[in-house]
Amino acid sequence: MAGTLKPDDLGPFRRTLQGLRARLKGDLSQMTDEALRLSAASGFSNLSNVPLHMADVGTENYDQEFTLGLIENEQGTLDLIEEALGRMERGTYGLCIECGGAIARPRLQAIPYARHCINCARLAENGG
Ligand SMILES: [Zn+2]
């Protein structure tokens, strides 16, 4: 099929995925540390360092939730990357998990861990 990835074409995608995985794993441990530090700080600051305004407390909680949200997103991306590398091992990388059609190369270059072809991705976004 035209546009299908050949084994020789996988190298750059594999390297991109492995690089992304390494970066996300580094980010994840860094952000987890940061979230724990914030959590500890808000727990122990009550005695010696009472915030002057309630707004300060709100901001701190917001920052923490924001960081935890990022961790969730990055963990999800990390899962997708692991899946994509697994599909590479099985020889199904670049194929839509929904319809089995080839995922267009520009889409893979933009999102190397994409699971769906553009048509199925659009259908999923529309709730179907
Ligand atoms: Zn599809």
Image (spheres, rainbow, N blue to C red):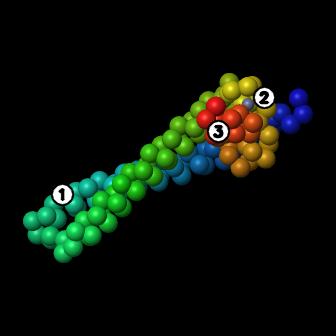
Residue 27: percent from left, percent from top: 47, 54
Quadrant in which residue 45 is drawn: bottom left
Mark 3 residue type: Asn
Residue 83 or 60: which is nearer the viewer? 60
Residue drawn where x is 68% and y is 27% of the image: 97
Q: Residue at x 45, y 52 (%)?
A: 70
CA–CA distance in space, label 3 to label 1: 42 Å
Q: Earlier in the sequence, mark 2 or mark 3?
A: 2
Q: Which residue is mark 2?
A: 101
Question: Is 36 situated left or right of 96 in this image?
Answer: left
Which is more toward the observer, 110 or 5? 110
The disc label shown at residue 126, or none? 3
Total numbered badges shown on the rendered structure? 3
Q: Is residue 25 left or right of residue 8?
A: left
Q: Is the residue at mark 2 in contact range of ligand 1, meaning its CB lies under 8 Å from it?
A: yes
The label number, if any, that marks residue 43 in the structure image = 1
Does residue 107 sit above or below 96 in this rendering?
below
Q: Which picture quadrant has residue 87? A: top right
